[in-house]
Image (cartoon, rainbow, N blue to C red):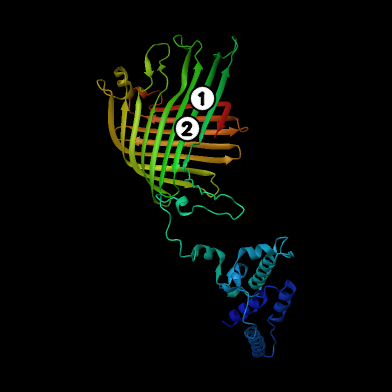
Amino acid sequence: MYRQILSVASFVCVLTAQTATKADSTELVKRTKWTFRADSTAFVYQSDLKDLINWRNASLSAPVYRKPLDAYCLRLVLPPTFYSSSVLQQFSATGDAVSEDPNLVRMFLVNDALAKMYVNIPGVVVQIDDQIEKAGTLRDDVHGSLTTETKLSDKVVNVDLGAGMEENVELVTRRPNFWKFPGEGSLRFLQNYFSDHWYKGGENSYAIYGALILNANYDNKQKTQWENRLEARLGFQTTGNSDKYHSVKPTDNLLRLTSKLGYRAFKTFYYTTQVQASTQLVPLYDANTDNLRTDFLDPLNVTVSVGMDYKFATKNNKFTGSVYMAPCSYDMRYVRKIELANRHGIAADRHAYHNFGPSITANYNWSIAKNVSWSGRIYWISNLSYTNIEWENTFRFSINKYLSAELYIFPKFDDSSKSYKGDHGYLMMKEYFSLGMNYRW
């Protein structure tokens, strides 16, 4: 207690005199600096107490009228506090600046004195400046927070900027925009050529691939998040002599819409409802026949689920993503052309089937290096009689802002239809490597 009274009194003596110079303050600090002798600590106590009493007597005998302290001296009357600005001033070029502005001089002197206190008697500091900011304001004319029905322009109107302004200024408020619309578009090409006498044979082909991804995401930074994603992927390749009925065939053929509405439960966990629908864009035929395999809305897969969504991110945001777990999901598959029903696991006399079961959806994005990234999607759904697992992987090697190479690997397991069974059972695989243009916004 003695050290706190002595330290505060010493610095108040230096700083409340508004006309004092920095040299004067240095002299006072030197005069009140503690000096310990080996013979007795009592001498030190009496000497310092005598200086304190003399200073108090001098202040009491001063004239009654004094200029009140202003905001620059506020830190002197507050409890000893650590202010980061005082330390930053010691490392700046303005720490010893001399100014004609008396207020600026007071600020320099206050910061210098506080910095000396932090070094010599750090034990008296009871709080930091962040704690003062969190404590809020002492004003009693502000009550609560503005609701959505209250306009700030109704509370602050006709702001007068002074006699030099002929007209008042009307305050205009704008609501924050919680929507973001990121997207991505790409166009890629592939070409193969083989001469007629190539010893292993071969077939010339050309391929083109395009993708468009649109997002509309809402986040009010409090409780509600609504994510919407539309993906369109379409690719064609020339068939050459392998298919006499069709000159080109689709290599990538997908239209998918995903909508996810979440309400924060705690931290990064959200109560979530997800709707996902996917189909094909163009028809696909069996080779050398006119037998239709898939078409637009043939089939249409729709999944509606309710569950919990967990969002994660590393400290440097190099690895981000989400895991959505739904204990109850409604899965529907529909075909327009009834002749395609049996091909896609639907009863021959029906256009659709309906199933219920759990599902999991995981999305992730990993920035492996400066120009290398890996994004993916894992999807699983089952009703105990069939299982559908999809794992999409996209490895991107960026050359610059507009050019990139891409490796796409898509293994899939689906035993919902016997027609999906091949040489390796119900496991299917799609892969391509391409170079082309890419643009993000």
Please indicate whether residue 258 sits to the left or right of residue 82 in the image: left
Residue 386 has which mark?
none
Please give the residue where the numbered disc 2 appears in the rendered image: 214
List x then y, in percent, for residue 173: 49, 47
Asked whether 108 or 348 is in front, the reply is 108
Which amino acid type is shown beneath numbered disc 2? Leu
Report whether residue 384 is seen.
no
Residue 120 locus on image (x, y percent): 66, 74
**Foreground of the two, 122 or 175:** 175
Residue type for callout 1: Gly
| Residue 382 sits above or below residue 195 on the image | below
**Quarter of the figure that contains the C terminus:** top right
* In-image side of 160 versus 422 (left or right): right
Q: Quadrant of the N terminus?
A: bottom right
Q: Give coordinates of residue 257: x percent, y percent.
A: 41, 32
Residue 67 location, quadrant: bottom right
**Location of residue 37 (image quadrant):** bottom right
What separation in Å lies between label 1 and label 2 (alpha carbons)? 14 Å
Tell me what residue is drawn at x 55 percent, y 30 percent: 406
Q: Residue at x 42, y 59 (%)?
A: 144
Q: Residues within 10 Å of mark 2 (few under 14, many from 20)?
A: some
For residue 210, the mark is 1
